[in-house]
Amino acid sequence: MAKILIIDDEPSILESLNMFLTEKGHRVFTAETGAKGLDLFSKKSFQVVIMDIRLPDFNGLDILQAMM
């Protein structure tokens, strides 16, 4: 199954996506901020990243640019 990173500042979204994807057999990592998401991304390899565009510390598009 896929290793998935979810970056979102809304706890309910993180929790529901985490539960759903974990039940489907995926390995899920979560981050509440762009900085934490970038840190995880730099330490592990992910097949999928699900990310909010509006985060308190970064614009999601800026994070996407940094990931490339």
Image: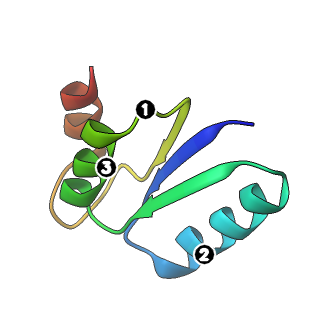
Q: Disc 1 designates what residue?
A: 45
Question: Residue sitting at 28 percent across and 61 percent down?
Answer: 55
Q: Quadrant of residue 41?
A: top left
Q: Disc 3 designates what residue?
A: 40
Question: Residue sitting at 83 percent across and 62 percent down?
Answer: 23
> Mark 1, residues whose alpha carbon is within 10 Å: few (<14), some, or many (≥20)?
few
Q: How is the image coloured?
A: rainbow
Question: Residue sitting at 74 percent across and 60 percent down?
Answer: 22
Which three-letter amino acid code belongs to the residue tagged 1?
Ser
> Mark 3, residues whose alpha carbon is within 10 Å: few (<14), some, or many (≥20)?
some
The reply to whether dot 2 and dot 3 touch (C-beta < 8 Å) is: no
Q: Nearer the viewer, residue 25 or 65?
A: 25
SS of the residue at dot 3? helix
| Outermost residue to the top | 68
Left or right of 62, for residue 60? right
Q: Nearer the viewer, residue 10 or 46?
A: 46
Q: Is residue 31 above or below residue 3?
A: below
Which three-letter amino acid code belongs to the residue tagged 3?
Leu
Instruction: Please state which of the two labelled residues, at mark 2 or mark 3, is closer to the viewer.
Output: 3
